[in-house]
Structures are given as structure tokens and as C-alpha cells.
Amino acid sequence: MNGIRAGKSGGAAADVIVLGGGVIGLTTALVLAGRGHRVRVWSGKPAAATTSAVAGALWWPYRIEPRDRVGDWSLKSLRWYEELAGRPRETGVRLVDGVHRGERLAALGAWAGQLKGVVEAGEGLRCRLPLIDMPVHLDWLEGQVRSAGGAVERRTVASFDEAAAEASAVVNCTGLGARNLVPDPGMRPVRGQLVLVENPGIQEWFTEADPASSETTYFFPQPGRLVLGGTALADDWSTVPDPRTAGEIVARCARVRPEIAAARVIGHRVGLRPARDAGVRIEAEALPGGGRLVHNYGHGGAGVTVALGCAEAAARLVG
């Protein structure tokens, strides 16, 4: 599994504490446990209540910087998800066909040349990519961390010193929480709203996104639902679904697949993507008393896409 293997940990002791229980924190904890570390994850929320649980979540480098590193991180994660797709009920990962309307290979980075089976058609790029049922995947990640000897605990912190008092290394995977914890004023939310409907029989995913626009159009067939999106509203902290926005999302998706217009709405979701002005931050610094702090945050709209690649980069800095 790309170098991830089970390790052993004794009791509640730990040499690494990971702050944050979303996909970035849990994947990082799993990689660290696989490298022989005794790991504890501290998260103020259960995984099901994190931003990660709201994600669509199609593998694709979307709204994330820096470009010169994102490709490698994404491809490492892609290969892992391709393996996990062999056990979809357990891992939540499936390989699904779909279309990125308007995309062209020449406009993407060098990473696109490593994709398998991509066809450039008149409407855009047809691909078979990992589509992840995030509630299932997050539950699987938690289970894997525990099976590897780690612990997942409900705990919040007001400073890194609290974690450093109990472990020699601390990994900061707090997403938007880093805005106040670090503090990092370059962290800002990019609000995404989704509508969940009963699937009228759609088997392929679809996306059409203009990076310059706050409106996107996509639908992802997930088990038991069709996920419709979406929005990308910078600096909007509201987590309350807006009925007008929901209607506009359904209407945009129905222009692509008319049967969506009559699909019964079964839920609404809002997530705040943890964007950072300077892009993803993966770097280490010393803590008072000789401890080591490793940052791994600022993944914007592609935390799922780069989760394993970033986890491995952060783990190397832990040592």
C-alpha cells in the first residue's frame, strides 16, 4: 500500500501528535504509524463533522497551489486510491467514468501526462478517476490508524505547547483552524454548497468549472445519492445552506442532465475549503523545549486529491 504498513503503539503514549481529524490529519497519522511512530490524533470534531466529510469527492487537482508540487502529491495519492478502489465497500473509493467539460490536456500541468486512459473529446476530457464516498473513507482511515496502533481522540488545543508537552513532534493538520492557531492570516474559507438528491439513474460524474467564477457545475454519483454542486465563494464563513443557491445548483446540473430537475432533494451540505494565499504549507520548525512542529495545511479544494502525497512529505519532516 505505497509504503503504508501497520505499526505498533503502546497505550496512550505517543512520540507524534497530529492535530486535525479530517482527511489530511488521518492520512498523515496513518503514514506516520506505518513508519513506526506512536501516533495520537487530536481533533475537536468527529471525522463525520469535518469539512472533509462534505467533499464531493472526485480526485482532481482543483483550486490548490503551488503548481510545481501539486502534481507529484496528486499522483502519489492517485496510485493509492487506485489500489483502494479494489475494496470500495470497505474504503469508500471507486473508479468511475466521467467528463471534465472544457478541459484540455495542454492546459494542465505535466502531471496530466501520467493519467491512464484519458480521451480528449470535443466536450472536454473523458477520464476514469477515483470518486470517494467520504463518510465511508474517513471511517476507514480512523479504523486503519487504530489498527496500526494509533489513537484518535476528541480534544481541542489553544496552542501547540499543549501537544508538545505530550509528544516530541506535533503535526499541524488543522485546516482553517490554522488561521488562529498558528496564527496564519493567509488562511481563508472558500465556501462550497452542495445539494443531495435521489439518483435518477446517472452513472457518470460531470464537472464544468471556471476558476475565475464563484459558480461551478458538477454531479457525482455516490452510493445512495447524487451529489450536485456547487459554489466557490472566497471569504464566506456561512455554513448555513442558502435555498436560492441550492435552486441555482439544481438548475445548472439539470441543464446538463434534464432528469435531475425532477429528482427528490434529500439533503443540503456546506463546507469551507481551507484555502491559503501562499498555497499548501508543508514545513518544519522548532518548538520551545526542543520539540518539532510540522505544518501540513492550506489544501484548498483538493485535500482529498493530495492527501497521501502531502502526508508522506510531512512524515519525512517528522523524521
Image (spheres, helix red, strand yellow):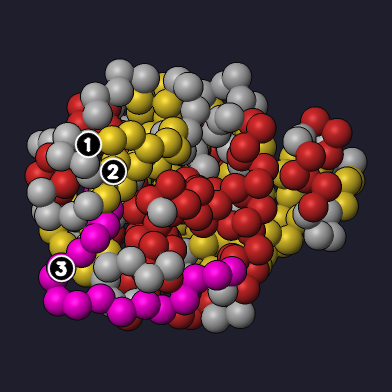
Image location of residue 80, percent across then percent down: 59, 66
At label 3, the amino acid type is Ala
Q: Residue at x 26, y 50 (%)?
A: 169
The answer to whether residue 137 is seen in the rendering is: no
At label 2, the amino acid type is Arg
Image location of residue 296, percent across then percent down: 40, 42
Mark pair 1, 3: CA separation: 19 Å
Image location of residue 312, percent across then percent down: 50, 55
Q: Which residue, given by chain and number where applicable, does mark 1 sit on?
A: 287
Q: Which residue, given by chain and number where applicable, does mark 2 sit on?
A: 292
Vertical order, 186 against 190 (above or below): above
- For the image, the number of numbered tags is 3
Q: Can you tell which quarter of the image residue 160 is in?
A: top left
Q: Which mark is residue 299?
A: none
Do tag 1 and tag 2 residues touch (Cβ < 8 Å)?
A: yes
Q: Which residue, given by chain and number where applicable, does mark 3 sit on?
A: 13
Q: Which residues are magenta?
A: 2-20
Q: Residue at x 87, y 52 (%)?
A: 119
The answer to whether residue 15 is seen in the rendering is: yes
